[in-house]
Image: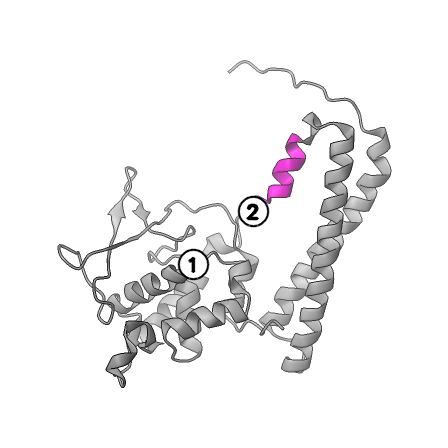
């Protein structure tokens, strides 16, 4: 059963896969020796922010906000705004809520983001009660500054003004080169995949409504949004299937002088 995603964490489900904004990001773990800074509670782990040739930030995680926070940073920050937890618990939540379906966050990335957020003052560590537990079990919670940073990031325009680049759409643009039987097979596979996903999302929606008790929350809206898109594409696929028999032979586009 998928645990419902809480606001504002649920917002990411609708925007992942968007094109990168002006500044892309990438960050790497470095030794605390010679570091620009080192995160408390994570021995030997620090972060160094590099500049790209264009002067933009380069950090790990794909989409980056104006404040330099990547999608993994924001997901972790949102989890810690819900309740205090350590890295192991955060990884469990990512698995249990199936967050990794829409946000690419590896297990090591969780600890990298925690280190970065802690050193930036966006999360703070609680007193270590059990020294034998190790840094992976050190509990963190979002600070007031971290919650403001999260709210500011979610207000940025790029979340809602960029279009997806679905892999299926790329295939469709190239499919004029495919033999007719390949085209038919792939379209059937797409339909079967979407039908399976629709069943799964409808089950999730039922669970959400039972747990939430109403339809007026971001979790229900998110899944409803997904269901609407699945139904729309399935209807389009049925239309294409009817017209596929009249599929014209491939024509090479006229070359335009540069």
Above or below, 141 relative to 169: below
Distance Cα–Cα, label 2 vs label 1? 24 Å
Above or below, 118 relative to 250: below
Q: Main secondary structure of the magenta part?
A: helix
Q: Residue at x 77, y 50 (%)?
A: 234
Does 33 appear in magenta? no
Residue interval drawn in magenta: 163-174
Indicate the position of residue 221 as horizontal and vertical percent values.
64, 68
Does 166 appear in magenta? yes
Q: Residue at x 27, y 86 (%)?
A: 129
Could you say which is closer to the camera, residue 43 or residue 152?
A: 43
Please rate how many residues cluster around mark 2, counting C-alpha atoms within 10 Å: few if below 14, some from 14 to 19, many from 20: few
Write down the residue under mark 2: 163
Indicate the position of residue 61 as horizontal and vertical percent values.
40, 53
From the viewer's perspective, is 254 left or right of 63?
Answer: right
In the rendered image, the quadrant that contains the N terminus is bottom right
Q: Earlier in the sequence, mark 2 or mark 1?
A: 1
Write down the residue under mark 1: 106
Asked whether residue 215 appears in the rendered view, the answer is: no
Indicate the position of residue 229 as horizontal and vertical percent values.
69, 55
From the viewer's perspective, is 192 left or right of 165?
Answer: right
Q: Residue at x 82, y 43 (%)?
A: 239
Choose top left, top right, bottom left or bottom right for residue 247. Answer: top right
| Residue furthest bottom as drawn | 129
Above or below, 240 relative to 88: above
Q: How many marks?
A: 2
Q: Of helix, strand and loop, which one carries label 2?
A: loop
Which one is in front in this view, the residue at disc 2 or the one at disc 1? 1
From the viewer's perspective, is 19 left or right of 186?
Answer: left
Find residue 209 and name its label.
none
């Amino acid at each position: 059963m998928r645990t419902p995603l809480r606001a504002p964490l649920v917002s990411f489900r609708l925007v992942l896969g968007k094109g990168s904004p002006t500044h892309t990001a990438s960050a790497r773990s470095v030794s605390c020796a010679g570091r620009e800074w080192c995160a408390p509670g994570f021995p030997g782990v620090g972060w160094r922010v590099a500049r790209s040739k264009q002067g933009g930030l380069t950090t790990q995680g794909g989409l980056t906000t104006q404040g330099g926070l990547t999608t993994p940073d924001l997901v972790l920050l949102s989890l810690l705004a819900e309740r205090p937890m350590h890295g192991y618990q955060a990884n469990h939540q990512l698995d249990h809520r199936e967050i990794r379906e829409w946000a690419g966050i590896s297990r090591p990335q969780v600890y990298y983001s925690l280190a970065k957020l802690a050193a930036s003052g966006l999360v703070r560590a609680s007193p270590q009660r059990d020294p034998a537990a190790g840094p992976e079990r050190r509990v963190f919670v979002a600070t007031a500054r971290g919650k403001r940073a999260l709210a500011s990031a979610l207000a940025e325009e790029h979340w809602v003004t960029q279009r997806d680049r679905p892999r299926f759409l790329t295939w469709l643009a190239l499919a004029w080169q495919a033999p007719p039987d390949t085209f038919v097979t792939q379209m059937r596979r797409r339909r079967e995949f979407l039908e399976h996903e629709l069943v799964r999302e409808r089950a999730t929606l039922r669970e959400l409504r039972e747990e939430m008790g109403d339809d007026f929350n971001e979790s229900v809206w998110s899944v409803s949004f997904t269901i609407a898109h699945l139904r729309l594409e399935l209807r389009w696929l049925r239309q294409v299937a009817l017209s596929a028999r009249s599929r014209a032979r491939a024509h090479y586009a006229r070359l335009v002088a540069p």
